[in-house]
Image (spheres, helix red, strand yellow):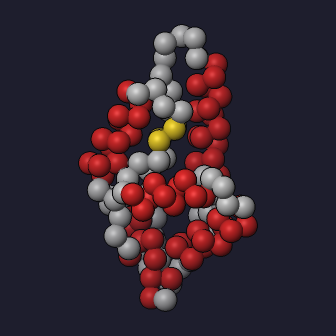
Amino acid sequence: MMPGPFEAVYAASKAFIHSFTEGLRNELKDTGITVTALMPGPTDTNFFHRAGMDDTKVGANKKDDPALVAKQDFEALMADKDDAIAGSLKTKIQGTVSKILPDTVNAEQHRQLTEPGSANK
């Protein structure tokens, strides 16, 4: 949903998936097949450790419960929603606000979370 400094390829891949999902959703709209773009925020998994992001703010901060994220995403899929920002209220607010902010602002906010060494700032 936003440019991703220090993880630009990952962020671009997520943007591709969102666009791809929306395209499929439109193509399949009259077939009864449900397609929903699932967009969780930072979730408490091993992702950040495996990505070498332990020293970043996002890596060190509290993350959303994976069971809550999975439940919300499943409910959105079953309700045939276009997309779902799943997780805590904070994650939902951040995701919703990012849709209206300019990419330059989103990129700077993302940078503050993902810059190496930012966990200690």
State whether residue 45 is above or below residue 19. Answer: below
Of residues 54 and 33, the one drawn nearer to the viewer in this rendering: 33
In the displayed orientation, state which residue is furthest to the left: 67
Q: Quadrant of residue 54?
A: bottom left
**Where residue 39 sits in the image (x, y, percent)?**
49, 47
Of residues 116 and 91, the one drawn nearer to the viewer in this rendering: 91
Residue at image coords 52%, 73%: 113
Of residues 117 and 93, the one drawn nearer to the viewer in this rendering: 93
In the displayed orientation, state which residue is furthest to the bottom: 121
State whether residue 18 is above or below residue 2. Answer: above
Residue at image coords 29%, 49%: 68
Is 66 left, or right, of 102 in this rendering? left
The reply to whether residue 65 is visible in this rendering is yes
**Where residue 21 sits in the image (x, y, percent)?**
58, 33
Residue at image coords 38%, 73%: 61
Q: Quadrant of residue 7?
A: bottom right
**Where residue 92 sits in the image (x, y, percent)?**
45, 54
**Where residue 19 sits in the image (x, y, percent)?**
65, 38
State whether residue 37 is above or below residue 108. Answer: above
Residue at image coords 51%, 38%: 83
The reply to whether residue 50 is visible in this rendering is no
Q: Quadrant of residue 26?
A: top right
